[in-house]
Amino acid sequence: MNYNTPQLISALSAHYVLGTLRGKARDRFETLKFANQNIQQEVDHWEAQLQPMSFKLSPISPEDHVWQNIQSRINARAAAMSERSQKSSKVVSIAAKTDNPDARKWKWVSGLAVAACLVLAILLMPYQSSRVDPLQSVAVINNEANQTLWSFDILQTQIAVKTTVLVPRLPNNDYQLWIVPASGDAPISIGVMLQSGEFKLDKPDIFDNIEIAALAVSREPKGGSPTGAPTVVLYAAEIAQL
Amino acid sequence: MKVLVTIIIKRQKCIEHELLLPLLQQVAKGNNRAFEDLYGRTSAQLFAVALTMLKNKEQAEEALQEAYVRIWYKADYYKTGQGTVLTWMVSIVRYRALDMLRHKKVRKTHIDSEFDKIVTGDENIRDDEELSQDWLNQDKIHTCMDELSAQQRQAIHLAYFNGFSHSEVVSHLGSPLGSVKSWIKRGLDSLQRCLGL
């Protein structure tokens, strides 16, 4: 589909904001949105114009425990990240902190080739503020020659993906990212990936609620798996906790 | 008269922005007191959004909590080109609720009786006269929605407020899928022209 058509971008953006863009189409659009400034701007415009519809709703005050829960979650995550940060500073010798207090970027060093295409890398995230969407864990996928194809920053709410130039372009297919549960249950889709550049995918809620054996990348028809299961699994990588 | 109304609306928009933008900027710096203030000023509106979509108190609270955690972590992602602070926040809670509807299969079959009256039908949607008194009434969307056909407006309302998919709008209205898709598409086209997007 040609996403460079302004009319199409506008129509899809409108359906995205309204909520009628669903399923795989929504996943794919979200992925494109992160990488395409025109799409992001169009979504911004529609959000700015449509969301005031919600002001027609009479406000309903939530109960006090909602605020307490928000505070608890933020504090718990900040404490957990602080603890992890302290541990990683002792264990991960390749980690290094940045001097820039506003920096959100992390440095990574791919480390260990595990098997044919399984690779684990250890990296470091400098946390200056508990407010920044914190880095929880990372994963790196290498090819058979131990060259990095993708790196994944598992943040609190999103997964930031970096694609290297070594990722083969698939003109007639898409790459799709999956959670491989340690329980042996069926893989759970995270989303269709762009074939180049840096972008973010929303992290599914289930990510933090199950034990994960690996992240996997599959080759799928355009738009993503037609069955809800991976079609051809190409790579997998363990996740390194920080 | 119309010019005067426009000026007033623009002023109201500025007021909202003047109140919330500095708070969000402080939140971006990790100021928890500002975050609490922001929550106090906005949570009732966002809770109404989540509750209307999810029709379940616990799920709506969950959506609200997740939304504010995201707001805490993402405050510095806000840019003025994304609309006002409040519309940006509404987007976050709506997308969260849509995710929950999709992945957790939360649905209208489980409606808390306590909130039944609030979130079913149009009881919680304020009329224009009431809304005109509200400082939140700030955008052209309400005028443009009034210019749609009744079918277009109803279909878009169901999708927006209830988080309905096309097929759910079909079930609710008992109309063919083709008609519903057409109403929503043409309604959005009309809104685009009216809003000057």
Image: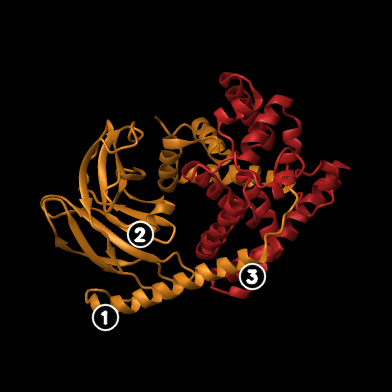
Chain colours: A orange, B red
For disc 1, the marked residue is A90
Tell me whether the residue at label 1 lies in contact with that at label 3, contact meaning CB atoms closer than 8 angstroms: no
Dot 2: within a 10 Å radius of its alpha carbon, few (fewer than 14), some, or many (20 or more) residues? many
Instruction: Give the letter of the chain under mark 1.
Output: A
The amino acid on which the numbered mark 2 sits, given as a three-letter code, is: Ile
For disc 3, the marked residue is B36
Q: Mark 2 or mark 1, which is nearer the start of the sequence?
A: 1
Q: Quadrant of the C terminus of chain B?
A: top right
Q: Is residue A71 above or below residue B83?
A: below
Q: Secondary structure at mark 2?
A: strand
Q: Are marks 3 and 2 on the same chain?
A: no
Dot 3: within a 10 Å radius of its alpha carbon, few (fewer than 14), some, or many (20 or more) residues? some
Q: Which mark is residue A154?
A: 2
Viewer-proximal residue among B57 and A118: B57
Residue B178 visible somewhere in the drawing:
yes
The amino acid on which the numbered mark 3 sits, given as a three-letter code, is: Glu
Left or right, residue B139 beside residue B103: right
Give the residue at the far front of this rendering: B113
Q: Is residue A209 above or below residue B131?
A: below
Q: Quadrant of the N terminus of chain B?
A: top right
Viewer-proximal residue among A133 and B26: A133
Give me the C-alpha separation between circle 1 and circle 2.
21 Å
Give me the C-alpha separation between circle 1 and circle 3.
35 Å
Dot 1: within a 10 Å radius of its alpha carbon, few (fewer than 14), some, or many (20 or more) residues? few
Q: Residue at x 61, y 20 (%)?
A: B179
Q: Residue at x 26, y 80 (%)?
A: A90
Give me the C-alpha separation between circle 3 and circle 2.
27 Å
